[in-house]
Amino acid sequence: MSHAVGDMLPPFTIESVSPQAMQQWAVFLADPNPIHLDVEVVKAKGLGDRVINQGPINVAYMMNMLMRAFPGGRIKAMDSRFLDNVYGGDRAVVTGKIAAIEGNAVTCEFSLDVDGRGTVNSGTATVET
Amino acid sequence: MSDLDDLPPAPDAAGTSLDGEKVFTITAEENAALCRSTGIEPAADGSAHPIYYYIATQVAMGKTVAGVCEACEFDVEDGPMMGSSGVRFDAPLKVGENYRVTGEILSLVRKRSRKLGVMDVLTYRLRLHMLDGTQVLETDNVWVLPRKEFAA
């Protein structure tokens, strides 16, 4: 498959961010921070009225977009910035484009946006194709 | 004169070892559950989801999240926030492979922000190795530690 600088990558969409997945990730991460598990704690801390997705899940969504865009490719490097929270029930969409190509290394820029609040994560990655 | 001159310096946490003793193994069952929790199926070639770069290094580093905060004289209950995360892979992560972690705190820098007030910016580096010492990846994470005690 050929690629060109400026090509848009197929979006990856999570229709509704899952509070049940947050419970699983509390185990995966060995980190039972209640802001990911208990909406009453989120409210008490003044952080909103829904549980907050663990940051690494958002990174995983962005990785999923890259892996779908480059089947058989391998992420060699990735940098992510956390700009805002993703909440349970959010519709989250990862979009991206090709920023550079050098040999079989494709550098991409991407962002994770949620409906109504815009970009909550952004990043760059190099994928070996 | 700096706008931080009225504040004590950030704790001297740079150099704190995060070397771990635990062996971390990515199981097929957990990898499958993790992949499905993010909306994809697990790979059929034995590779694990690359987000295990973050999970394996966090779980098997030498301190808990609360312990890292404590090294920075910060109470984890005050809400550390992820600022950024970077990773460089030398090899793909594999289901069934055993890994160990080395690492250290690189810096803790006190800053003042319009949005968060006084905060300490923590940067730490972790490396994931196979048990024979071969490095698989290196990751740098940045956390923001809001210092509510210095709120105006």
Image (cartoon, rainbow, N blue to C red):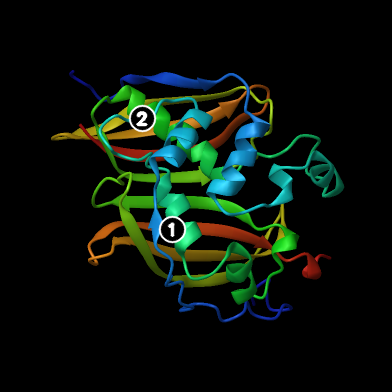
Relative placement, left or right, of B89 versus B151 is left
User: Residue B119: x, y in percent?
Assistant: 67, 64
* Residue A84 visible to the viewer: no
Residue type, mark 1 in image: Thr
Q: Are marks 1 and 2 on the same chain?
A: no
Q: Residue B128 occupies which quadrant of the picture? A: bottom left
- Quadrant of the drawing holding the N terminus of chain B: bottom right
Reply above or below: A47 against B143.
Answer: above
Q: Pointer 2: residues within 10 angstroms few (<14), some, or many (20+)?
A: many
What residue is drawn where x is 42% and y is 58%? Answer: B140
Q: Residue A67 occupies which quadrant of the picture? A: top left
Relative placement, left or right, of A51 versus A84 is right
Circle 1 or circle 2, nearest the eye: 1
Location of mark 2 (residue): A66
Location of mark 1 (residue): B57
Residue type, mark 2 in image: Leu
Closest to the observer, B109 or B145: B145
Secondary-structure class at tag 1 = helix
Q: Pointer 1: residues within 10 angstroms few (<14), some, or many (20+)?
A: many
User: Residue B151: x, y in percent?
Assistant: 81, 65
